[in-house]
Image: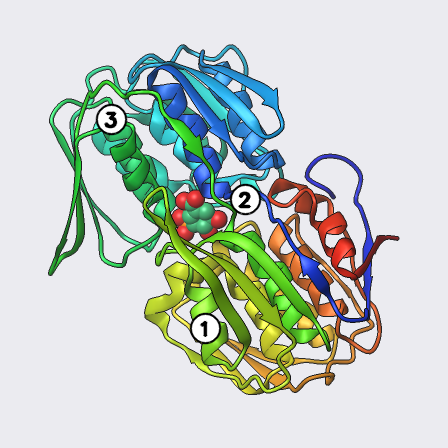
Amino acid sequence: MSSHGAPIPMTSSKCGPLKGVAHVPGDKSISHRSLILGAMSVGETRITGLLEGQDVLDTGKAMRAFGAGVTDLGGGEWAVQGVGVGGFAEPEGVIDCGNSGTGVRLIMGTMATTPITATFTGDASLNGRPMGRITDPLALFGTQAYGRKGGRLPLTLVGAADPMPVRYTVPMPSAQVKSAVLLAGLNAPGQTVVIEKEATRDHTERMLSGFGADISVEETEEGRVITLNGQPELKPQTIVVPRDPSSAAFPVCAALIVEGSDVLVPNIGLNPTRAGLFTTLREMGANLTYENEREEGGEPVADLRAKFSPDMKGIAVPPERAASMIDEYPILSVVASFAEGRTYMAGVKELRVKESDRIDAMAVGLRANGVDVDETEDSWTVHGMGPGGVKGGATCATHLDHRIAMSFMCLGMATDHPVMIDDGGAIATSFPIFEDLMGGLGADVARR
Ligand code: S3P
């Protein structure tokens, strides 16, 4: 089943060289946060380059349901009329976050310390994902949660009327959990402290500081200690959303495996908490270069140039790098299929609770297309077949997971036989222009 409508079966067939410039959409993580923090500030926030994928549109709809004004001004520009910290109104209907774990988890945090009640739901993928990791720390603020077994959605939250500030150590590497606690801490008096043992993407911290919150980060023996002073007045901002490195990964990786390719992917944020894939690819011997390196809005940015790379070797990806490339393991496993030797990916248990169980979804589909894959609960190994060595020919189940769908479409660009997916509907959640963009570079990806 597709997340929004009938399934969209798709086929990707071997193509000639991929060539040209790939302008990928805005960053999904930053887009969600722009709408949410805009809604929490006092006045009008302007956003350009917002990702207009379904996940982010669902967050925009939710912000309206809580009383903020969210207006599409056209051409990727949006205006958000904020209601201020603690200013959320009780929504009249159920908040449907579709496929988006980031959307629902951040919004649950944001409303948790306001005395209103809201019920959240999503599609079959989202309703199967764990929410206890959010409701457990929110309970420390005084928020009550009534969900299905295992804390699954649909779930009702009753916001705390007299929230307590909390000190919380995030038990797994998760930017969503960290962010939910910080957003809840915004409307609690005093200091909320969040500790993460491993650094995860830091967009929430950076943006809270940009919106004028009093937030500090200290590296200690315990880990990253983030301290937020509650109940600030957030000031509206003008935000230019950088392009998404997680979306850039698809044209970059496709170019590395398709013979003769040379693709430029401009303006990609290389925040170290997000750029682990590109480091890994370069260690594997990928012909991937950073051009025009610069700083924009306090973030390192570069144009990525990726060329066909017939000499890539499998490596052991350091587990401490996992958080900085957690969404990129599916497409890395595709590149690894065309490298020589084994690629070992450890410390990645979190992949099992994403939009799908991503280790299982990729392992099953890669095996069906002629690639050997071994897996344990928290690691997996892809046995590379070398350039041009993957047979293809099989249909892969995508489990409502956009990154699984796009990864298998990239696989088919370099296999002997076409690769099919049962449903590409979820691609629109993060990369609505994927088919057109890849087609423009020379890929043969079609709905059939
Ligand atoms: C995200 C955090 C990550 C990532 C997701 C986006 C975010 O999830 O997988 O796509 O924007 O905070 P986890 O927090 O579950 O690691």
Three-letter residue code for mark 2: Gly
Per the rendering, the mark at residue 186 is: 3
Three-letter residue code for mark 1: Thr
- Distance between mark 3 and mark 1 Cα atoms: 36 Å
- Distance between mark 1 and mark 2 Cα atoms: 31 Å
Three-letter residue code for mark 3: Leu
Give the camera-side residue of 71 and 32.
71
Residue sitting at x 40%, y 34%: 106
Q: Specify which label sits upstream in the sequence, 1 or 2.
A: 2
Residue sitting at x 28%, y 33%: 210
Give the camera-side residue of 113 and 38.
38
Report if residue 95 is visible in the image. Answer: no
Per the rendering, the mark at residue 280 is: 1
Residue position marked by numbered label 2 in the rendering: 128
SS class, disc 1: helix
Mark 2 Cα shell of 10 Å, populated few (<14), some (14-19), many (≥20): some
Q: Position of residue 348 (x, y in %)?
A: 43, 66
Q: Is residue 242 positioned above or below 209 on the image? A: below
